[in-house]
Amino acid sequence: MPNWGETVPFDGAPVTVERDPARDAARAELLNPAYHRHDPSLLERIRTWIFDQLDRAFGAVGLPGGGMTTAVLFLLVAAVLAAALWWRFGRLGRTARTAATLFDSTGPATAADHRAAAAAHAAAGAWDDAVREQLRALIRGLEERTLLDVRPGRTADEAAAEAGRVLPAHADALHRAARTFDDVVYGEHAADRAAYHSLLELDLAVGTARPTLTGAAG
């Protein structure tokens, strides 16, 4: 009888095969893709692992196992994770949005220019554009009155805060106007006729308001 690693050919003479090469050959043969055509995919293996972990976790706390229970709780966990991610990255997005400037880079324009543009947009029913131009008109008017310094890169919130210190009686309305501007610019809410007319009335009010000089910016 041949020893390990020996094969006997038809003529009866033993042929010796080294043990390590034989093992390597067997391993190489098992790696043949033909033997793994029906293996589960990576996604299936991950899903199976997650379900196994959930089954163990539910068993540890005395909850009934089973495919349906596992699937339902898995969906609940996924929903919680999705909500947490949305809150996290949505919050970051809302924070980052305040970096957008009130005036674009197309060049300086007077308050009258912005008011005319706002009125034209309003006449066409383009309320989002009308709201944007009307707040720009309001802030540019305060700059022209030297109640605010001309500062490129100012955001709507910054402009409203600075104007509110100069005109404290209108601070709350200015803050609401900046919120309206941001909501329109970043697509959270669509503007309407009421939003435009509210800004128009505020522009008229601050245009004749007396400043509090001790709080002036500039």
Image (spheres, rainbow, N blue to C red):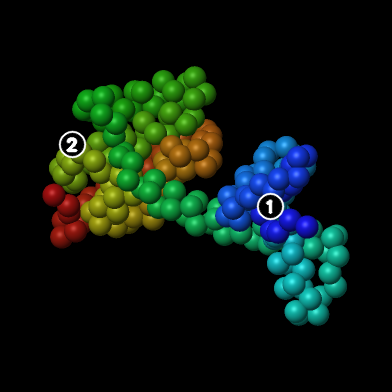
Horizontal and vertical percent for residue 36? Answer: 72, 43
9 is higher (above) or lower (below) than 164: above
Is 47 placed left or right of 97 in the picture?
right
Q: Residue at x 39, y 34 (%)?
A: 132
Q: Which mark is residue 45?
A: none
171 is higher (above) or lower (below) than 64: above
Is 113 placed left or right of 8 in the picture?
left
Displayed quadrant of residue 216 = bottom left
Horizontal and vertical percent for residue 58? Answer: 77, 73
Relative to the observer, which residue lies in front, 174 or 12?
A: 12
Q: Is residue 177 visible?
A: no
Horizontal and vertical percent for residue 171? Answer: 34, 55
Displayed quadrant of residue 113 = top left
Camera-side mark, 1 or 2: 1
Is 22 placed left or right of 141 in the picture?
right
Q: Which mark is residue 144?
A: 2
Q: Residue at x 63, y 50 (%)?
A: 16
Which quadrant, please, contains the N terminus?
Answer: bottom right
Q: Residue at x 44, y 48 (%)?
A: 93
Which amino acid is tagged 1?
A: Glu
Callout 2 secondary element:
helix
Callout 1 secondary element:
strand
Which amino acid is tagged 2?
A: Glu
Count of numbered circles in the view:
2
The earlier-in-sequence mark between 1 and 2 is 1
Horizontal and vertical percent for residue 14? Answer: 69, 48
Badge 1, how many Cα within 10 Å: few under 14, some, many 20+? some
Pointer 1 residue: 6
Q: Is residue 193 visible?
A: yes
Badge 2, how many Cα within 10 Å: few under 14, some, many 20+? some
Relative to the observer, which residue lies in front, 30 or 143?
A: 30
